[in-house]
Amino acid sequence: MSNVAHAKGHGRRRSKRSAARAFPEEDPDFQIAPMIDVLLVLLVFFMSISSTEVLQATKGIELPVAADGRDAAKSAKQVIVNVSWNLVGDAGAITIDDKGYATPPDIVPILKARTEVVPETRVLIRADKQVRYAYLREIMIAVGQAGIPNVTFSVVDKDK
């Protein structure tokens, strides 16, 4: 009988110990420093893979709105033609690489020179919303005379 009593007592001690081990004494603390590290790494990652092209801003040109517009990739194969419109004089102005041109036929030699260097050159037209269609048509005719078949229009996706 003493063996049985000893076994029962031993079993009770064991169950008390295992019950004490099952519940932790403290709740774990939330560590904010590793969370900040992870967020900073994600921020750097998304900044590095995001498009580095910033919308070129030219004073006096307000781009038209197009909800279905896509981002254009900037490259050396691209010529940006800025077209502004003066409402007072009802006349347009053309700018390529910060140099102004009086009429659309004046840009033909510039565009031809670019296509001689890079045959796959495309033209990105950044025209103000106020530009008249007839003036824009003259610019597109000049681009065609320069031998450039790829023309893209720059727009914004929403009004300010």
Image (cartoon, rainbow, N blue to C red):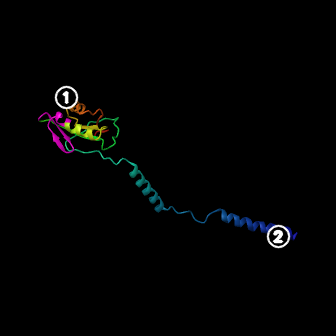
In magenta, the rendered stretch is 89-108
Query: Can residue 99 be found in the magenta stretch?
Result: yes
| Nearer to me, 122 or 84 | 122
Earlier along the polypeptide chain: callout 1 or callout 2? 2
Please give the residue where the numbered disc 2 appears in the rendered image: 6
Name of the residue lying farthest toward the right: 1
Name of the residue lying farthest toward the front: 116
Kind of residue at badge 1: Ala
- At horizontal 46% and vertical 57% (from top left) the residue drawn is 38
Q: Which mark is residue 134?
A: 1
Categorize mark 1 by other alpha carbons within 10 Å: few (<14), some (14-19), many (20+).
few
| Location of residue 89 by image quarter | top left
| Location of residue 133 by image quarter | top left
Q: Residue 63: x and y, percent?
A: 25, 38
- Asked if residue 100 can be seen in this view, the reply is yes
| Nearer to me, 53 or 110 | 110
Categorize mark 2 by other alpha carbons within 10 Å: few (<14), some (14-19), many (20+).
few
Q: Residue 143: x and y, percent?
A: 24, 33
- Asked if residue 154 can be seen in this view, the reply is no
Label 1 with label 2: CB-CB less than 8 Å? no
Q: Which mark is residue 159?
A: none
Q: Determine the CA span between mark 1 and mark 2.
A: 107 Å
